[in-house]
Image (cartoon, helix red, strand yellow):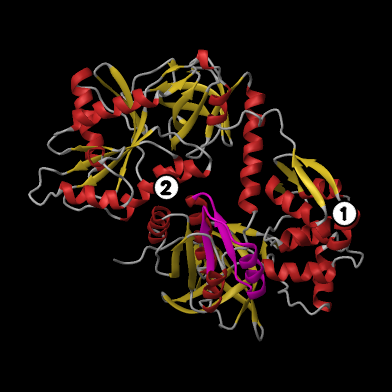
């Protein structure tokens, strides 16, 4: 925590804070601008006013209902509670949230803290946030206004089982059949036609994107096509997809791939899947199995036919003239177009010039293109498009909504940004480091194997020459007491992803002084780990030559200083800068310019071609004709240096 923020919370000056903290026995370096959260908590406990209201008394005396928005500042929340801000801040810290007076906390955090003081906290919905998720929007549409839309399918499965090859085969066959020579644009999804009926395929690679969508409550996929290699069988990621389908209640079609290989064994694959709870229709189950070879384009037509048949049974519908809503499936920053987002429209119709908000981004739709690079004026349900005109990059899984004006869209985006920031603050104690050994010790717990794999892959990218990243343990599920004890013995920080920490484990973490950070987005986890690594890297000082001067005369020599005169031969020389003394081209010592004059007038710098007089601090006896090479020292920006492979 910043010392300035801590002083504001205690309502005292930084100088008084340092003095009172020192008197209370806390050791803060005179140059320190930040202190760790544990020390900040101790200082607040020690220095806050003695009239602190006991939580038990508050609970008894103040039991009543209050309403807060999705986010609220700590100052405003303390005002609603009628409690000193320091009391509320202390409670937030006890609950793992380091927030200053003006920072925002989310409703969940406010609810927990309010409950500790005897308040029942209810959410007060704002007019810009009551649009809900895509599922809620669809539920509000009248049945008679809904029409059948194209199914949205995601091809998933274990690494190297042929997901990408299958998507490529479907796409190429469709391009050849419809628009020969068309150039495919990667926009995260594409639409094909089979027997004059459209199917949208998600082409967003990796578990991370799907995890990000789920974290934001987005469920874009109507049908999951599970690809299993006939020569390899069921693997961890295969089971992961099965569990995802069960969790989200998404219909499943199994594509047994690589049936053309000599060691293919379809019956074994069926048995393994049956053991995992996915029973083929021919064995009395409900799941369609389609044998294919994506490489040889065998059985792919049959797979498309089964997708359409399942879509007909499920009867996916949307209202093309209803509330426009979609989900961001990809985003990137273009040098020529600015923020660009790929979106699948799930209800309503998106049009050029619509005012939109997606997460913390807002704007006016300037341009829309499809997967063939063709401009579109409208996008109806199940259509994937790439749009431009946003103020910033939305996140994968953000819900895109339309509004009647830019201010409305901006208000929605601002609320999303504050909520996002508040949620990120919750359950964050910071990543601790082993500075003595230049090492980060981490214990990772995630919701699924796929999430865990994605995190490990991202951490591998951060391997560097300066700091060791050591994963002492990893696992699936919520964070428990055992994890806290393991982290304590391994001097590690616990990183959670899409999971929770039990109240008992949270209390134990405080007692054992174990840091626990829980994330919903992988890039935020990697950002924090990167920052922790950079904090450990020792700063490098870079010396830049700013000028050279030739000494023409020595006027006085004292014990540790000299008065000399000369002329600037290159660049310039500056007051208070260091220099190197060169004699006959050899370096003989160093010094510092303590006084500088030009034409007997004090100067801060003297430029090339001008004469000067100066007093220097040095232990070297500078002589006539010596060269002073004046240098400027700059601390290099810290960067990760990749490990040699």
Q: Quick check: can you spot residue 383?
A: no
Q: Quadrant of the C terminus?
A: bottom left
First in sequence, mark 2 or 1: give its number.
1
Q: Is residue 75 left or right of residue 297?
A: right
Residue 83 numbered tag: 1
Q: Residues within 10 Å of mark 1 (few under 14, many from 20)?
A: some
Q: Nearer the viewer, residue 438 or 610?
A: 438
Residue 332 image-quadrant placement: top left
Q: Is residue 199 magenta?
A: no
Farthest front residue in view: 284
Please, what secondary structure does the residue beneath circle 2 have? helix
Residue 425 position (above or below residue 619): above
Residue 131 position (above or below residue 376): below
Q: What is the magenta range?
A: 493-521
Residue located 63% across and 18% down the image = 404
The residue to which callout 2 is attached is 208
Please, what secondary structure does the residue beneath circle 1 have? loop
Q: Is residue 510 magenta?
A: yes
């Amino acid at each position: 925590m910043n010392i300035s923020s801590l002083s504001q919370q205690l309502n005292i000056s930084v100088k008084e804070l340092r003095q009172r903290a020192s008197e209370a026995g806390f050791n803060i370096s005179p140059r320190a601008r930040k202190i760790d959260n544990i020390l900040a908590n101790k200082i607040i406990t020690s220095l806050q006013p003695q009239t602190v209201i006991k939580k038990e008394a508050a609970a008894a005396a103040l039991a009543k209902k209050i309403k807060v928005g999705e986010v609220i500042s700590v100052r405003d929340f303390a005002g609603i509670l009628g409690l000193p801000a320091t009391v509320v801040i202390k409670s937030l810290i006890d609950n793992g949230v380091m927030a200053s007076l003006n920072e925002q906390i989310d409703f969940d955090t406010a609810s927990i803290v309010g409950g500790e003081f005897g308040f029942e906290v209810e959410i007060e919905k704002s007019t810009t946030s009551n649009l809900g998720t895509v599922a809620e929007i669809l539920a509000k549409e009248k049945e008679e206004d809904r029409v059948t839309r194209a199914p949205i399918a995601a091809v998933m499965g274990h690494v190297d089982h042929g997901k990408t090859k299958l998507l490529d085969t479907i796409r190429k066959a469709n391009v050849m059949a419809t628009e020969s020579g068309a150039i495919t644009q990667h926009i995260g999804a594409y639409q094909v036609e089979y027997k004059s009926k459209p199917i949208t395929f998600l082409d967003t690679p990796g578990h991370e994107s799907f995890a990000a969508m789920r974290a934001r409550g987005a469920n874009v996929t109507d049908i999951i096509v599970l690809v299993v290699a006939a020569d390899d069988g069921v693997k961890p990621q295969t089971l992961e997809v099965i569990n995802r389908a069960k969790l989200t209640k998404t219909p499943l079609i199994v594509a047994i791939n690589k049936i053309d290989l000599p060691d293919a064994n379809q019956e074994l694959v069926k048995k393994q899947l049956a053991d995992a709870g996915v029973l083929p229709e021919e064995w009395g189950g409900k799941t369609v199995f389609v044998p294919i070879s994506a490489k040889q384009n065998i059985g792919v037509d049959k797979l498309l036919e089964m997708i359409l048949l399942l879509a007909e049974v499920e009867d996916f519908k949307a209202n093309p003239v209803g509330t426009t809503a979609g989900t961001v499936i990809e985003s990137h920053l273009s040098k020529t177009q600015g923020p660009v987002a790929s979106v699948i429209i799930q209800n309503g119709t998106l049009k050029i010039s619509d005012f939109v908000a997606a997460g913390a981004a807002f704007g006016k739709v300037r341009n829309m293109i499809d997967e063939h690079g063709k401009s579109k004026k409208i996008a109806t349900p199940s259509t994937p498009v790439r749009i431009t005109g946003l103020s910033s990059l939305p996140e994968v899984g953000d819900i895109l909504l339309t509004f009647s004006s830019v201010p409305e869209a901006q208000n929605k985006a601002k609320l999303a940004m504050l909520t996002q920031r508040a949620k990120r603050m919750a359950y964050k104690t910071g990543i601790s480091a082993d500075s003595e050994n230049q090492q980060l010790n981490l214990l990772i717990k995630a919701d699924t194997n796929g999430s865990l794999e994605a995190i490990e892959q991202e951490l591998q990218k951060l391997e560097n020459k300066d700091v060791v990243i050591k994963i002492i343990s990893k696992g699936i599920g919520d964070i428990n007491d055992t994890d806290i004890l393991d982290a304590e013995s391994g001097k590690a920080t616990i990183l959670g992803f899409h999971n929770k920490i039990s109240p008992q484990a949270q209390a134990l973490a405080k007692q054992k002084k174990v840091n626990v950070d829980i994330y919903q987005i992988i890039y935020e986890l990697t950002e924090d780990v990167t920052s922790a690594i950079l904090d450990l890297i020792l700063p490098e000082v870079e010396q830049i030559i700013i000028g050279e001067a030739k000494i023409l005369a020595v006027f006085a020599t004292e014990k540790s200083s000299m008065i000399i005169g000369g002329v600037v031969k290159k660049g310039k020389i500056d007051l208070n800068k260091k220099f190197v003394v060169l004699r006959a081209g050899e370096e003989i010592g160093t010094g510092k310019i303590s006084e500088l004059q030009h034409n007997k007038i004090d100067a801060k710098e003297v430029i090339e071609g001008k004469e000067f007089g100066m007093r220097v601090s040095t232990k070297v006896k500078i002589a006539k004709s010596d060269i002073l090479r004046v240098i400027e020292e700059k601390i290099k920006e810290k960067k990760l240096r990749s490990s040699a492979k």
